[in-house]
Image (cartoon, rainbow, N blue to C red):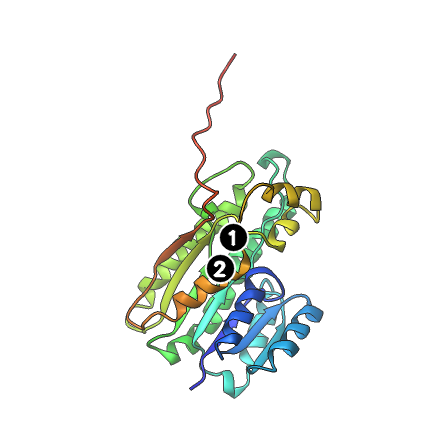
Amino acid sequence: MTSTVFITGATSGFGEACARRFAEAGWSLIITGRREDRLNALAQELSAKVDVLPLAVDVRDRKAMEAAIGSLPAQFSTLTALVNNAGLALGNDPAPSCDLDDWETMVDTNIKGLLYTTRLLLPRLIAHGRGAGIVNLGSVAGSYPYPGSHVYGGTKAFVKQFSLNLRCDLQGTGVRVTDLEPGMCESEFSLVRFGGDKARYDATYAGVEPLQPQDIADTIYWILTQPAHINVNRLEVMPVNQAWAGFAVNRQK
């Protein structure tokens, strides 16, 4: 039986790289994204290799997700894997000067969108049973605070704890759950965070050899193709150039 993976946020970055990686391995794909033109172009390209079902849907829209997943064709009724990739950071200004709409968008995407997708697909993953897997894209920001990470880091801390809790609830089903936490990675993610400011994007990676989306896609593929008795609970992946900052101290003069 052909393995099938459901990938959210497949129109760029980690999601697009994952779609290409799993297609190379012969997996059938269900890919989602808000940018229908990009999504359809990727689906058309990869359909030369494997079966691809594009779903132009926003993970934040619960009713749209319910409709899209509820109407999946019979050939996709059983799912091997879910990659909860859709997510974003918006800005990195200090909390007092942030846009509350940006905070709400991050919560709606990184938390609620992940919850909708996971809950709606759990029956299909459980139907597959042993060997099925979920990879939730967390971040090192969920463990290590830094200025400007406030809500983004908070949403990724949620992803970490939700993944661990989900493991408890899926005990005995054969479904595996992993929280994958990348560090600095060069992708459209940062361009979105900085509102399209290319100069800030370039400065972020200046003099650094960051991770690439393909690195993360390879890691996700490795996680999901481990023997069925192995669960990778939580995995941090960082570039060698990146480490943890020291404690900040505000010295009074």
Answer above or below: position of 159 versus 22. Answer: above
Left or right: 64, with 237 as reference point: right
Q: Measured from the top left, where is residue 81 in percent x and y?
A: 44, 72
Amino acid carrying label 2: it is Ile
Answer above or below: position of 61 versus 193. Answer: below
Q: Which residue is mark 2?
A: 216
Amino acid carrying label 1: it is Leu
Q: Measured from the top left, where is residue 45 in percent x and y?
A: 64, 77
Task: Give the residue displayed 58% in from the left and 80% down from the top.
Answer: 52
In three-dimensional space, the C-alpha distance between marks 2 and 1, rounded to whole angstroms, equals 8 Å
Left or right: 40, with 78 as reference point: right
- Cβ atoms under marks 2 and 1 closer than 8 Å: yes
Task: Give the residue displayed 44% in from the left and 62% down from the top.
Answer: 219
Answer above or below: position of 143 versus 3. Answer: above
Q: Nearer the viewer, residue 214 or 154?
A: 214
Q: Nearer the viewer, residue 159 or 19?
A: 19
Element at label 2: helix
Q: Which residue is mark 1?
A: 211
Residue density around tag 2, few if under 14, some if 14–19, many if 20 or more, within 10 Å? many
Element at label 1: loop
